[in-house]
Amino acid sequence: MKINQTKMGSSDCFSDDYLFQQIRNGQYEAMELFFNRYYMPLCRFGMSYESNSCLVEEKVADIFIQLWTNRNILDKIINPKSYIYVIVKNSLKTARKSEQFYQQIDETKPINSMFSPSREQEIIENEQKEMKTNLIREILDIIPKKSRQAFELSRIDGLKYKEIAEILNVTPKTVENHIALALKYISKALESYKKEGVLNSI
């Protein structure tokens, strides 16, 4: 999706609703800005449903192609951010069931480092600057899947509880509980590491 963005500039200048409106009007520049804004976050989110990074990248890219192809219906979308996350989730869950059935998933392929926990590590290290990378990975791995997803969508992608609720198909209160649980796991793990002297300081 390489086009001239001089007319529209940085994606930070425009809301999702505005970009959707421009995409519906056939502005391909808006499509690329929206793609650049959400491609990486969606790939990271997709990795929580599918470990095959190639499949995740393909499915996420397909979402943007579908958006452009079906741009005439975008005016019906109330929350673009929640909309694309839900599409990615459903697409990967469907693909996973299909591929498991035909046993065609190649489990030996390494996960692309762009979508590995290093992305999560970078964000969390900003809040816990003296944590070691391997400890962060261990902490994230012990958090239950749903709680980890809610935590990442909130702390990494910056989504609101209501948006996360729409994506995970739960209530905002459940999202709040998942994040509280994730923080509890993190807090307990950090306290344990601290007592063991693994961390110099928190």
Image (tube, helix red, strand yellow):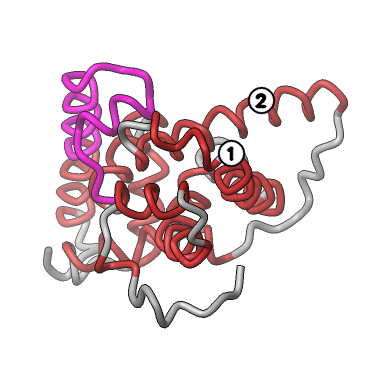
Q: Which residue is mark 1?
A: 70
Q: Is residue 176 magenta?
A: yes
Residue 163 image offset from top left, x and y in percent? 27, 33
Alpha carbon of mark 2 to alpha carbon of mark 1: how far? 20 Å
Q: Is residue 128 magenta?
A: no
Q: Nearer the viewer, residue 18 or 109?
A: 18
Residue 76 image offset from top left, x and y in percent? 39, 29
Nearer the viewer's eye, disc 2 or disc 1?
Answer: 1
Q: Earlier in the sequence, mark 2 or mark 1?
A: 1
Q: Alpha-carbon neighbours of circle 2 within 10 Å: few (<14), some, or many (≥20)?
A: few
**Is 134 left, or right, of 95 in this rendering?**
left
Under mark 2, the amino acid is Thr
- Across the whole image, how many numbered discs are drawn on residues? 2
Task: Please tell me which residue is depicted at 48% across the width and 60% down the height of the picture.
Answer: 27
Q: Is residue 92 visible?
A: yes
Quarter residue 117 falls in: bottom left
Under mark 1, the amino acid is Asn
Residue placed furthest toward the front: 25
Q: Nearer the viewer, residue 103 or 33?
A: 33
| Label drawn at residue 94 | 2
**Is 17 left, or right, of 187 in this rendering?**
right
Residue 37 image offset from top left, x and y in percent? 40, 61
Element on which disc 1 rests: loop
User: In the image, which residues are magenta?
Assistant: 157-184
Quarter residue 159 falls in: top left
